[in-house]
Image (tube, helix red, strand yellow):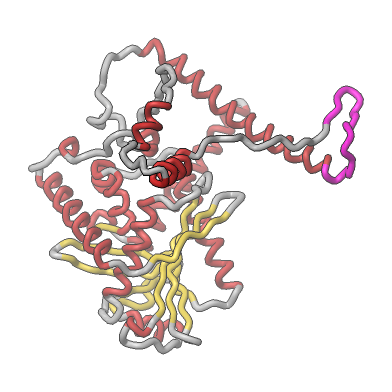
Amino acid sequence: MDSSDRGKALLELFRQGLANYGQRQTQAMLGDRTAYIGMSDIARYTECPRAAVAGKLLPPGTSLSRLLTLARGHWFEDGVGQCLAALGLHVLPQLEIRHTYRGVPIRAHLDFTLVWELPRPAVRILEVKSMEQLPADPYAAHELQISGQTGLLRRLWNKPTFSLRDKNGRILHDNLTFPQICREHLGLAFPDSVRDVSLEGWLLCLSMKEARAFGPYGYDAESLANIFTQARAFWAQLQDIRTGSLTLDAVPHAQGFHPLCACCRFNADCPKFPQGDYQPQWQPALTRLDALKQSRSTLDAAIKEMEAALKLACQLSGTQNWINTGQHRFRCTTAAGRRSLNREALHDELADIFRFEHLDDIDVDALLSRCEREGAAASRLIINAIS
């Protein structure tokens, strides 16, 4: 066996280990996920009902890439837990909330719930999300998830619906109210009424290089009602498929462009993508193009890193002159920012001028539209992997 085969064997061993570990952790901490609707399931359902339903019916993906993505989330959670423990904070990890709404079993698993008594009783729900790159704004599905968690905790505060497990999945406390959980596990006294408590939810988004927090998220009765409505529709479709009265392809799918479609595990036979003509002779070209794009992304990242290092070298040198390296010279300069027309500001300025000049009959939007110019149409190649 040559070195490449031995390397593949090592990766396969690693993949199997990740799969076994993931299955054990899921069973220990989350139980049988097909028997209830989770808050993350509902969030996914709002994006694409078909993908969410398929995720409940079909076995999980076992590719190394998929398993690494899932494991990374668990590793980040472990790291955040260690950070919180080092600060000596009162934390309830993986708090579980069970609720049945009109026959639909719903569970929420809260990554971390921070609590304190003084100066005012307070609860902070922390939902951890691992990502390749951090977004400028939180994803709608993540906001729905944390809003649902916050809403459920507030709605069920004094109901015996809370449970807590240790890191091995062993139940520590079961079917208690939230104040009872805090008293039994942390020795803290919380009021029976949630109205006397400051309650917020937060998203903590982490990548390998950055972290960003979004929030706070509070209780919203309308949002919680919408979550319950989505859960009922989700559960009904699951039961109909299991009894054979509905097919997966009859479940609605995401409409229009959606960034998750390209990496969805269930896109191979999704009605959103008609099968079209089968022409396998183009597969090598597409594989090569995908490899080139990945190489370009790697090169772009390396170029940016090297340029940042050389800019820093210029700053540390303290010189405004060229730096001569023998075969090359370099220096750091400042370029003017790109100028652009603020259409909204121009609209307001023109509207004010016309109003002052008593020319209110002039349609500013129509005027701006007449002055716009549209470029020539361009073709675009769209490529999606078939999972």
State left or right for residue 276 relative to residue 17. Answer: left
Q: How many labels does the image show?
A: 0
Residue 104: % across, % down: 17, 61
Figure quadrant of the C terminus: top left
In the displayed structure, would residue 208 be above or below residue 123?
above
In the displayed structure, would residue 108 be above or below residue 134?
below
- The quadrant holding residue 247 is top left
Residue drawn at the location 41% of the way across and 78% of the way down: 198
- The quadrant holding residue 364 is top left
Res. 36 visible in picture? no
Instruction: Name the residue nearer the viewer: 138 or 342.
Output: 342
Q: Is residue 321 magenta?
A: yes
Instruction: Name the residue nearer the viewer: 330 or 293.
Output: 330
State left or right for residue 210 relative to residue 48. Answer: right
Among all residues in the image, which is located at the extreme left? 245
Among all residues in the image, which is located at the extreme front? 357
Residue drawn at the location 53% of the way across and 54% of the way down: 206
In the displayed structure, would residue 292 be above or below residue 13?
above
Among all residues in the image, which is located at the extreme top? 281
Query: What is the span of residues highlighted in magenta in the rendered image?
Result: 315-330
Figure quadrant of the N terminus: top right
State left or right for residue 42 relative to residue 344. Answer: left
Q: Is residue 325 magenta?
A: yes
Res. 90 visible in picture? yes
Residue 24: % across, % down: 40, 56
Residue 251: % across, % down: 18, 40
In the displayed structure, would residue 376 be above or below residue 177?
above
Residue drawn at the location 18% of the way across and 65% of the way down: 101
